[in-house]
Amino acid sequence: MTDLAESTPCLLQQTELQAQRESLRQAIVRDALRLGPTLTFDLKRVLTQAGLCHTAGRLLWQAIRHLQPRLLIGPGFGGLPLAYAVAHHALEADGVDLALWLVRDKRKTYYSQRWIEGPELPADVRAVVIDDFLGAGSVLDLVEQAMADEKRQARLCGLGVLLDNWTPLGSRQIGLRLFPVLSVFRRHDLGLSRDCFDARPPDMQGAAPPFVRRMAWWRFAFNGHTRHPFKSSPAVADDSVFAVDDGGTAWRFDGASGEALWRTPPAGVHYKGVVQRLQHVDGSIVYGSYDGTLTRLCARSGAIVWRLRVDSSVHATSWVDAASGRLFINTEQSNRGEPCGHLQALDWACGRPLWRRPQAFWPPGSPVFDRQAAAVLATANDGLLVCVDAASGELRWSVQTQGLVRGQPVVTPDRRVAVATEDGHLQAFDLATGALLASRPYGPGLRHQVLLSSASCLYAFDARSHLLALRHGDLALQWLSRLRSPGAVGPLRWGRYLLVLSEEGHLAVFDESRGLKLWEGAIKGQYRQLPALGTVAGRPVLACASEASGLLLYEIDAFYGDSPDA
């Protein structure tokens, strides 16, 4: 009982410190990571908050105190507040009274004209350089130059930083050539590692099993040409895999054997073929083609229920409101060199046009129908986002987005319309009025991106190979993860997991609630389209239509559940 009583305060202190460390980590992700044309860090926004700076100083003192320093050297605005916080905790926790040197970014040109502010000390004093961020290690050049110019000496025995970017020419070289580099966080702690969160050498895998273990079958002749990189996404339903190849032929394959059950040829041939996310709705397959036709097939037999030419070409994926018997689609018209298009509603039963609204330019973006608002939202290449009445097509509002949106908007739980533009901006508009409620850069933009919304976050890709989770409302960054290649279209949800297929065939699985990468691997082929998830004879499967490496079906490990709702 005595041992337990004595250890309880220590355990409580450690738990409290871990909670503070996690709060500090979240603050760095939210406030210090700058998502723009390049990913940069600005930790001053964190260290100018007293509570966070206090926690950073406490954690960094724990990391460096075994070096037994007697002098802290704080360069510039990043190092100075952190050095003071470290010195405070050294005095408070261990009774160590540390001296401080402030190193300016250049020599002061007035009064004392000093480069270093702080007391004169013996030449053999043990010193640790303190800084907020370590990239290539240029801070050491500044400290050494200032010390030489001021004719000051100290025994440098370490470098302590809040965040170490862990670059080959930074901390790793410094640690090998000079002295230890000790940090509170490395970029891996922020999700900026390609490996899964608990990866261990030599294979750099974690505890979670592979998401896909075995290829069930491979139709390697499916999709053959490379003239156009975008292909159609497959669909998994009725113990089968449905897909449209890059020649425009629709197929149904037996999910167990890969045997072709039926095929339906296209109305015409276009080199871009079909580039949509194939829809399986109401016992039917529906897709549009670059030959200008929209087709509804019977999923059981492949028979054409209806097929009609709706414009010159169709890039967008349709939205089927089967409950009300309607289909909404964006279509494109070449118009003799003056591009335009239409947002249309058709009767789901027979394809009869219900209404047709002109778009000022080609609209490759896919529309979204919101039942609660009875509204359809769509974009076009003139940069407009429009909201129209679902019953009549009458315009409710239109707004200019900060860049093209050739993917698909999403309606969030707080009744906003969110878009990711190709200029690298994430924007949220009021669904009722179109008023801009939030906007922020998210990095280099991707074409044809489809955002995924959860109860609390939006998920997006950038062109730098990151998956981003951004909070509804203010679009604050909640977590991010580095991928091995840019993500294809958008993430998919499988139970409590997120699945990402990247352009170079890399797969990554995330625990959505914790924002952690559990597993990563790779499959055959390259991709500019989503895979499909589903079940075949009760077994969970992943279907992927590659650019030129065929149609592949993989079995999903039972660890991840047996259905999308597991």
Image (spheres, rainbow, N blue to C red):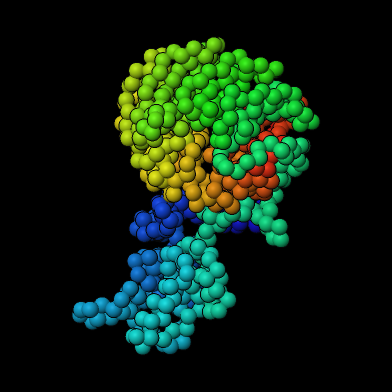
Please tell me how many numbered marks the rendered image carries.
Answer: 0
Q: Is residue 520 above or below residue 499?
A: below
Q: Using the image as rendered, state which of residue 58 and residue 178 is in the foreground.
A: 178
Residue at (65%, 37%) from the top-left corner? Answer: 223
Residue at (68%, 43%) from the top-left corner? Answer: 549
Provide residue 559's location: percent of width, then percent of height. Answer: 72, 39
Provide residue 413's location: percent of width, then percent of height. Answer: 45, 29
Q: Is residue 122 above or below residue 443?
A: below
Provide residue 422's location: percent of width, then percent of height. Answer: 42, 43
- Image quadrant containing the C terminus: top right
Q: Using the image as rendered, state which of residue 120 and residue 437 is in the foreground.
A: 437
Q: Using the image as rendered, state which of residue 213 and residue 516 is in the foreground.
A: 213
Residue at (67%, 48%) from the top-left corner? Answer: 522
Residue extending furthest left? 111
Q: Is residue 52 visible?
A: no
Q: Is residue 62 above or below residue 124?
A: above
Provide residue 307's location: percent of width, then percent of height. Answer: 56, 17
Q: Is residue 278 above or below residue 194?
A: above
Q: Using the image as rendered, state which of residue 461 and residue 34 is in the foreground.
A: 461
Residue extending furthest right? 257
Asked which quadrant contains residue 252, the reply is: top right
Residue at (49%, 38%) from the top-left corner? Answer: 448
